[in-house]
Amino acid sequence: MSYKIAVLAGDGIGPEIVAQARKVIEAIAEKYKHQIEYTEALVGAVAIDEVGNPYPDDTHEICMNSDAVLFGAIGHPKFDNDPSAKVRPEQGLLAMRQKLGLYANLRPVNTFKSLIHKSPLKTELVDGADFMCIRELTGGIYFGRPQGRSEDGQTAYDTCVYAVEEIERIVRLGFEFAGKRRKRLTIVDKANVLATSRLWRETAQRIEPEYPEIEVEYMFVDNAAMQIITWPKRFDVMVTENMFGDILTDEASVISGSMGMLPSASIGVNTSVFEPIHGSYPQAAGKNIANPCATVLSAAMMFEYAFGMMKEGALIRKAVDEALEAGVVTEDIADGKKAYSTDQVGDWLADFVKNYSL
């Protein structure tokens, strides 16, 4: 099979971790006789520096003409530390989501046996935790208008907006995922306060009878934040709106012991984007110390969700598990033992794939 992949490495550690994912993708392609065509494109701060736009039209065209997008990270301190900046890297991320119709962000949260001791939570709480967070990605307060500041600059305002069709689309996806897993769905909102959340709950309750095999619970976001920390194994599939999902999934990332281990997929109307959940980590950029595993696991999700290749995805996951067991890890999870470089981890994973007997 032949596939076109748009490569948007982005900022900070993005180029380094994406390079390791490409090594593994190429090893998979060689083993399974696939043809992969890469096209690199600018995004984020580097795109602002080059062309003044964090998501240039050329980049969008490349994404639209690809079967999947492999994405690194966006962000740079020079913009983070300048609240007055008119153009920001994160605007490119929002533009990409909107233009590609990336309406659902899938973030699996699970533990790795050899990393459980790295979690800040007690072992008995996190051992066996395995749930999927589905975050609505193109609506809510990040995209709502009006947005801005008053003329005197003393008041700022954001608007949270959701339409029924946006809610219905993401809620149905949640039910479908729950049906393929343990048949439990948690719908997170703030319906006791927010009008948009009440619309979410009304819409979900209308759809619920269509999926009688799914056990559904409705949970306020503040309670959900507490439950993720105190009882993470209670969850199977969680679906929520844009800002709540952004916050809750970052919170949930600590369950695994390192944010550098969790991948994500943004499912789109036109094409889908696969990326690690961590940021650009500018402090580590160029030092060859960043953990590439989340990006490699995002590549596994790409094979599974974009290409429908479950065997390929499973082999990538096995390679990561074996690397963890063998202690071939970067300094963030080395736990005082030998730390491998970003390149070394990528090479080990690619070699494992190449040498694995099918």
Image (cartoon, rainbow, N blue to C red):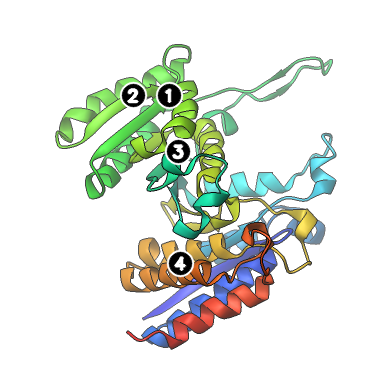
CA gap, disc 3 to disc 4?
29 Å
Q: Residue 238: x, y in percent?
A: 38, 37
Of callouts 1 and 3, the N-terminal one: 3
- Which amino acid, mark 1? Asp
Q: Secondary structure at mark 2?
A: strand
**Mark 3 touching mark 4, by CB under 8 A?**
no
Residue 232 as seen in the image, left or right of residue 177: right
Which quarter of the image is occupied by the N terminus?
bottom left
Q: Residue 240: x, y in percent?
A: 43, 33
Q: Residue 48: x, y in percent?
A: 77, 54
- Which amino acid, mark 2? Tyr
Name the residue located 49 percent from the left edge and 22 percent from the top edge: 222
**Mark 2 touching mark 1, by CB under 8 A?**
yes
Residue 7 as seen in the image, left or right of residue 302: right
Tell which tag, 4 or 1, sits nearer the viewer. Answer: 4
Q: Which residue is mark 4?
A: 321
